[in-house]
Amino acid sequence: MDKPVEQPAPKPEIDIASMPDAREVTAVRHWNPRLFSFRVTRARSFRFRSGEFVMIGLPGDDGRLILRAYSIASPSWDEELEFYSIKVPNGPLTSRLQHIRPGDHVIVRPKPTGTLVLDALKPGRRIFLFATGTGIAPFASLIRDPEIYEKFDQVILTHTTRTVTGLDYGKDVVRRTLEDPLVGEEAREKLLHDTATTREEYPTMGRITDRIRSGAFFAQHGLAPFNAAEDRAMICGSMGLNMDMKAILEEAGLEEGSNSRPGDYVVEKAFVGEGIGA
């Protein structure tokens, strides 16, 4: 007589909502098969500077939290927190996070930090925001913050992705910014949005670093080349972009800054664009 097969005991459900720092998901949008954004409730005590990142996560099968650094894509005045993520195949966190729905909960640690903040830059006239992939997230926060338009006469946001649909989130954020009653008027006057792809056919193609070195980027938008006396910059993307842009900016005479010592440009070193949220 065959022995009955013992079934493993069912794993107890984890009540995320009762965990410390749990925030409720209010909206989720999938931009393409690899990219999605979501919004969560914000604790009344939570304070951050536009451009900072925070640790967010979900519990794994063993109940232990899987945490990753995510830039906050909403501005500091927003009543909710917005995040933008890539879906990493078999990623410990995003393999779970990509399935969240409104009403679910995620963990948002209450200690934001980061270098992509206006306090880390010296005063200037133009500010360049260089992003690839999901690296646009901190800039989605900054371009919706009135402070950036108070401090700079022109805000140039560049976003380069592999595919055309990879640009959709950034385009939507810019649209919302231009329509926003708080910053829309100044953004329509000061914000320039440069988009390009590197693989799929698009009106503007090529790496931003190549377009800058060739002069095509400046010519396309009628911009003067970098001027260390009045230009400031922020960089967030792949390691290749970060290193190449640092070299370009330093060749133009710009010096790197930090929270403790403001400079001409800053780069986010905590993560790189395509690796956010793995």
Image (spheres, helix red, strand yellow):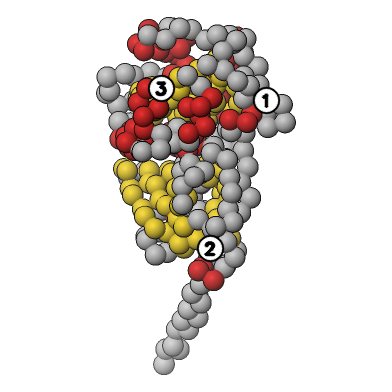
Under circle 3, the secondary element is helix
Residue 223 bears which disc, if any? Answer: none
* Horizontal and vertical percent position of residue 258: 67, 29
Q: Quadrant of residue 103?
A: bottom left
Q: What is the distance, in whole Å, between disc 1 and disc 3 at their CAs?
A: 23 Å
Q: In x, y percent, where is residue 37?
A: 39, 47
Q: Which residue is mark 2?
A: 22
Of mark 1 and mark 3, the one earlier in the sequence is 3
Secondary structure at numbered mark 1: loop
Label 3 amino acid?
Lys
Return the residue at label 3.
Answer: 190
Q: Dot 3: within a 10 Å radius of its alpha carbon, few (fewer than 14), some, or many (20 or more) residues?
A: some
Closer to us: 160 or 226: 226
Query: What SS does tag 2 mark?
Result: strand
Residue placed most toward the observer, 98 or 232: 232
CB within 8 Å, label 1 to label 3: no
Residue at left offset 45%, top offset 23%: 155
Figure check: 267 above or below 106: above
Question: Residue 162 lies in what quarter of the image?
Answer: top left
Residue situated in front as seen by the camera: 188 or 219? 188
Of marks 1 and 2, the one in the foreground: 1
**If you read the primary sequence from the N terminus, does the residue marked by circle 3 or circle 2 appear first?**
2
Residue type indicated by callout 1: Pro
Q: Residue at x 46, y 47 (%)?
A: 78
- Look at the picture and state if 204 lies above or below 19: above
**Mark 1 sits on what residue?**
262
